[in-house]
Image (tube, rainbow, N blue to C red):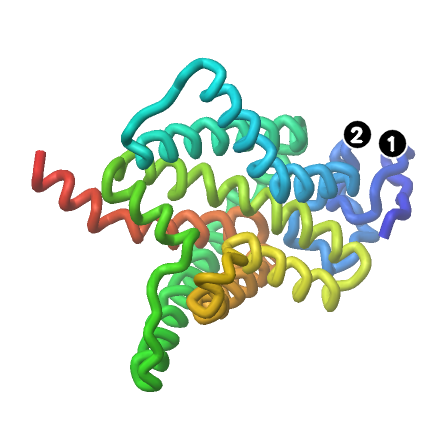
Amino acid sequence: MFKKVKCNNCENHYDETFDECPNCHSPNRELNPNFKHIQMLKFGKQIALFLTGLVGFEILGIIVSLIFSLFGFTSNNQVLVNMVLNAVVYGLLFIILFAIVNVDVKKLLKSFKKWQPFVAGLCCFGALIGFSIIYGILLQIFRVNISSNENQTLIDVTTNNYPITALVIFGFIGPICEELTYRVGLFSFLKRFSKWLAYPVSILVFALIHFSFDPANIVNELINLPVYIFAGFALTFTYDKFGFAGSLFAHILNNVISFIPAIVILGVII
């Protein structure tokens, strides 16, 4: 799906997956219904978003860690160091991803003007919570012992010590970066070829970025994996049918709700 269509109004040639001419904003009357709701960017930007989000976090983490070492930023409080590191890295990644999107940010914001994506996002959030509860009950029935995976453990530790900062990083910035990477980037690009390719690949990649391949904890990680696979499916489906606003709203709501106990406890202490 890399063909171009000709605008009947200004005769500009543009990507056939765009819902309107980027020059005169006339609607694309030849738009494939498969791309009606998702926000399609140029395929080069889609690839850039995915690759930046996928490897950018690790690369930025290494660079920032080296800078911290060079300037002597050390502390006996490892939780504090990890919190500052995550804040800086997520902040930089957020800036880079939006720099890639650039003027196309208007496309992403269009879906926020409708109410349907927010209702869909709320339903998606309900599905995520429902699946987690049912899956947890099944694990209890079959007496499967499970603890938080490495990704969730890091979030929990940061939340318990720095709840407000963790809320901003993992509740808002993290979901925005992931939605730009795996929905606007990866899924949208793969859907140019086939939704049957886009769905399984983007869901699996999304699940695996929350997976630790540490052999010592591999069983616990595998037990936690279905939760992330279902989350990948639910968020991808919501994005596909209702756009960026729907999946982002569900993702943020799902992450933020987990911070409420820590925020309440902090308020009681203060």
For label 1, count other residues whose C-alpha is less than 10 Å away and answer few (under 14), some (14-19) or many (20+).
few
Residue 74 image position (x, y, % from top left): 36, 23
Q: Is residue 205 left or right of residue 197?
A: left
Residue 31 in view in this figure: yes
Q: Identify the disc placed on residue 10.
A: 1
Q: Amino acid at mark 2?
A: Asn
Q: Is residue 186 left or right of residue 153?
A: right
Residue 81, compared with residue 190, is above or below; it is above
| Residue nearest the viewer, comparing 130 with 270 | 270
Residue 34 image position (x, y, % from top left): 73, 60
Q: Is residue 188 left or right of residue 261?
A: right
Q: Identify the disc placed on residue 23.
A: 2
Residue 186 image position (x, y, % from top left): 68, 50
Q: Amino acid at mark 1?
A: Cys
**Which residue is depicted at the point 67% across and 44% down?**
50
Disc 1, SS: loop
Residue 211 in view in this figure: no
